């Protein structure tokens, strides 16, 4: 008897579609969670208690509810009160509100980790509060937030597998369909696990490389590289001899 009995070539198109759907869930959900998490973090740091309290309540609620429960509440619970979302919308919304709570804590800690002297220096230069945050505080906070943010991205990618509970057509949903047709659960789930590893391990290493470059002060954009090169050129220009 052959060790591999699942006709994988027959399932390649379906697996390709499932892989694409998994990546779509990951990209959309992480982008949404990043934006929402940053907004909640800024509210947590607001001097106004009326803004801090709802943000703190949101963070504590979604940090202490299982993601699976949030998926069920979003897909099945909202439908019971006539708020109907399709599978993609419900899946992304569940991942967004769950991971935004954790990202908000990461961003809040990173922003708080920037020395107050940076804010004071920006204000002394006549910069507005918004300019101080966007041009002084947030770039420095990015370096501090990278390790935790990178971990959340990889974790979110793996957590898309929980969307199998609402038949979200991602990798784990396809694995369940293949298992029901072939009755080769061990082989199928070993292969799907290998696919997840092939996605997550290179991603984690790429993010680690990016983190090291940023911490080393390497410019990551052409505009930044041009500005750095211009600054170095100015520093190397010698004064004319009189």
Image (cartoon, rainbow, N blue to C red):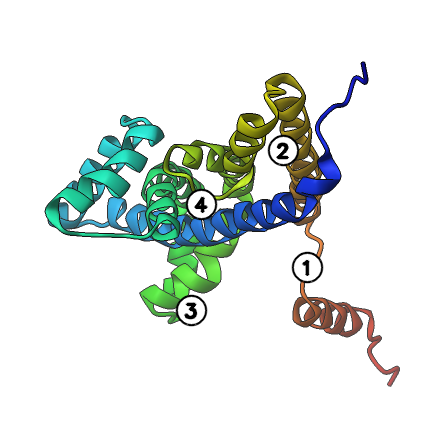
Question: Spatial distance from mark 3 to mark 1, Cα to Cα?
Answer: 26 Å
Q: CA distance from mark 1 to mark 4?
A: 21 Å
User: Disc 3 vs disc 4: which is toward the camera?
Assistant: 4
Whether residue 99 sits left or right of residue 159 in the image: it is left
Which quadrant of the structure image shows residue 112?
top left
In this view, the mark in front (2 or 4)? 2
What residue is pinned by disc 1? 220
Q: Position of residue 16 (x, y in %)?
A: 64, 48
Q: For numbered disc 2, what is the local secondary structure?
A: helix
Which mark is in front, 2 or 3? 2
- Which residue occupies the foreground of this view, 207 or 66? 66
Q: CA distance from mark 3 to mark 4?
A: 18 Å
Rendered image quadrant of residue 194: top right
Q: Earlier in the sequence, mark 3 or mark 1?
A: 3
Q: Nearer the viewer, mark 1 or mark 4?
A: 1
Are there few (<14), some (14-19), or many (20+) residues within 10 Å of tag 2?
Answer: some
Q: CA distance from mark 2 to mark 3?
A: 49 Å
Q: Is residue 94 left or right of residue 179?
A: left
The residue where tag 4 is placed is: 114
């Amino acid at each position: 008897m052959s060790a591999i009995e699942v006709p994988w070539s027959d399932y390649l198109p379906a697996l390709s579609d499932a892989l694409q759907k998994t990546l779509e869930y990951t990209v959309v959900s992480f982008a949404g969670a990043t934006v929402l998490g940053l907004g909640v973090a800024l509210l947590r740091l607001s001097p106004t208690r009326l803004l801090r309290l709802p943000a703190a309540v949101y963070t504590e609620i979604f940090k202490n509810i299982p993601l699976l429960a949030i998926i069920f509440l979003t897909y099945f619970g909202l439908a019971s009160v006539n708020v109907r979302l399709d599978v993609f919308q419900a899946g992304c919304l569940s991942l967004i509100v769950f991971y935004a709570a954790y990202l908000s804590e990461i961003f809040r800690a990173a922003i708080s980790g920037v020395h107050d002297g940076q804010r004071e220096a920006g204000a002394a230069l006549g910069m507005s509060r918004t300019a101080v945050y966007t041009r002084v505080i947030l770039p420095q906070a990015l370096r501090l937030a990278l390790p935790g943010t990178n971990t959340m991205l990889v974790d979110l990618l793996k957590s898309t597998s929980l969307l199998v509970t609402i038949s979200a057509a991602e990798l784990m949903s396809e694995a369940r369909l293949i298992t029901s047709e072939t009755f080769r659960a061990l082989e199928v789930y070993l292969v799907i696990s290998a696919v997840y590893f092939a996605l997550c391990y290179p991603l984690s290493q790429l993010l680690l490389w990016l983190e090291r470059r940023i911490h080393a002060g390497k410019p990551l954009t052409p505009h930044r590289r041009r500005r750095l090169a211009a600054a170095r050129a100015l520093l190397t220009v010698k004064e004319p001899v009189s």
